[in-house]
Image: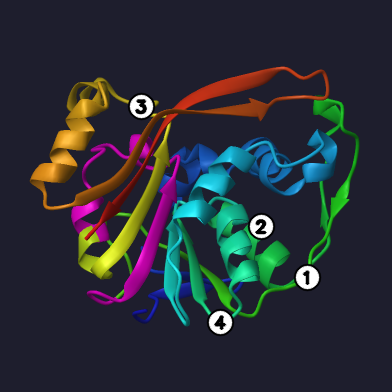
Amino acid sequence: MRKPISTRREIPFHYAKTEQEFTDDVYERYNELVTRQTALHLADELHGGYPFQDLLNYLLHWLPDGKGLTVADVGCSVGRLAGEVAGRHPDWSVHGIDLSYQMLRQANDYWVKGDRIPLNLTRYGFGLPTLSTIPLANLSFALARAEDLPFADASLDVLVNTFLIDRLLDPFAAFPEFHRVLRPGGRLITVTPLNFLTPDGWHAAHPPVKMFNHLRQSGWEILDWVDPLVLHEPMDKRGNAVTWACVAFVARK
């Protein structure tokens, strides 16, 4: 990984995020987005299990076998998937990448430092739980853009991204970078609801056959394609939820 341009509270920055970008980024809002993501991905006891277990199962099924592999989760949020991979494979090197400093700080506190994380979930009916875990020595987090990753050419064995590409202004913009950092034969594992933020995104990549064709034409070998992979995101103790109809696929460089 290249040298960061700065560091904030142990989080390396590989992108000079401006104060205006911090202000405009909803994923920097701790009490709103970070707390909700933490409750969704780290507070299994509140939900009777991990709500996105089907997503995790898909990822684990498609991880390759091997010793000493290098894995990156791009758009890692609070680090659940990266933490699961690192915990199951202590000899692997696992990196969580996101553009939100607040998400990365929460992930680093929980997975790397092993801090106890207090949450105020009273507005959702869950009270004031405190989360804790055992720190993982083979996991690190850093801030970077998906279109400009801090990894050397052909340095990753697996690149994971979930709920990411539809957050980009151009849903295809990161795929050349994914291709660059993966080793020959490396795997790209993607899960996305294709819930685009802009009309241009919808026009470029919906229906999903457009994305499938784009990948094939760009030289990716498609190993698996699931549409839909349905995920339910709980919103409160009542059981209200958002349903995501995701596309899940695995491609090989």
- Left or right relative to 253: residue 231: right
Q: Label 2, secondary structure: give it.
A: helix
For label 2, the residue is 106
Q: Amino acid at mark 1?
A: Ile
- Left or right relative to 103: residue 147: left
Write the start and end of the magenta stretch as one range: 152-178
Q: Does residue 186 sit above or below 191 in this rendering?
A: below
Camera-near label (3 vs 1) is 1
Q: Residue at x 14, y 44 (%)?
A: 216
Q: Earlier in the sequence, mark 4 or mark 1?
A: 4
- Left or right relative to 11: residue 118: right
The quarter of the picture where the C terminus appears is: bottom left
Q: Residue at x 27, y 37 (%)?
A: 169
For the residue carrying disc 1, how many other residues have a C-alpha within 10 Å: few (<14), some (14-19), or many (20+)? few
How far apart are the two marked residues, 3 and 1, measured between alpha carbons? 36 Å
How far apart are the two marked residues, 2 and 3, measured between alpha carbons? 25 Å
Q: Label 4, secondary structure: give it.
A: loop
The quarter of the picture where the N terminus appears is: bottom left
For label 1, the residue is 134
For label 3, the residue is 197
Determine which of the numbered discs, if any, sits on residue 104 in the image: none
